[in-house]
Amino acid sequence: MPDPQPTREASRPVDEIERDLLYLLTATDGHPIWTRDDLSRELNVHHSGDYLQGLRRAGLVHETSDGHVFASRAGVRAVQITGEAV
């Protein structure tokens, strides 16, 4: 029986997933506020909260008490500085 294929999450570095989360939260054509579950589905990861923790500690995202996540002003500016379209 062949080994199961690794999940997309297992084959991606943590910093890449964190970057994708921040880009998703700052996309001008997307939603400005997301739930953890919606972020997990959009990025095909099991627990987006695991990846949001580092971004929260860095001050790049905020999370409400009911689990909604949005980019902080610092997060938006960080994406602007790196040259990615927001």
Image (cartoon, helix red, strand yellow):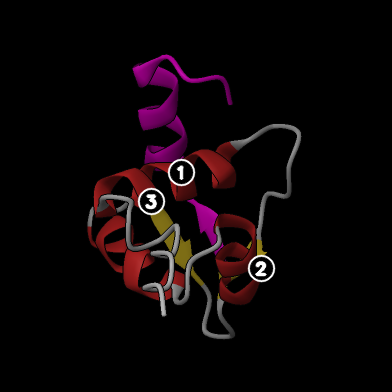
x and y, in percent, of residue 15 in the image: 26, 47
Q: Which three-letter amino acid code belongs to the residue tagged 2?
A: Asp
Instruction: Categorize mark 2 by other alpha carbons within 10 Å: few (<14), some (14-19), many (20+).
Output: few
Residue 7 picture quarter: bottom left
| C-alpha distance separating marks 2 and 3 | 15 Å
* Magenta residue span: 69-86
Q: Which residue is mark 3?
A: 17
- What element does badge 1 sit on? helix
Residue 80 picture quarter: top left
Magenta stretch containing residue 27, yes or no? no
Q: Which three-letter amino acid code belongs to the residue tagged 3?
A: Ile
Q: Give yes or no for contact between labels 1 and 2 (Cβ–Cβ under 8 Å).
A: no
- What element does badge 3 sit on? helix
Q: Which residue is mark 2?
A: 38
Q: Residue at x 64, y 58 (%)?
A: 42
Q: Which mark is residue 40?
A: none
Instruction: Categorize mark 3 by other alpha carbons within 10 Å: few (<14), some (14-19), many (20+).
Output: some
Q: Which three-letter amino acid code belongs to the residue tagged 1?
A: Asp
Quadrant where the N terminus is found in the figure: bottom left
* Marked residue nearer the N-terminal end (1 or 2): 1
- Pick whichever, 8 or 85, lies toward us: 8
Q: Residue at x 48, y 20 (%)?
A: 84
Quadrant where the C terminus is found in the figure: top right
- Pick whichever, 28 or 43, lies toward us: 43
x and y, in percent, of residue 26 in the image: 57, 39
- What element does badge 2 sit on? helix
Which residue sits furthest bottom?
Answer: 66
* Marked residue nearer the N-terminal end (2 or 3): 3
Q: As displayed, is residue 45 above or below residue 71? A: below
x and y, in percent, of residue 11 in the image: 32, 54
Q: Which mark is residue 20?
A: 1
| C-alpha distance separating marks 1 and 3 | 5 Å
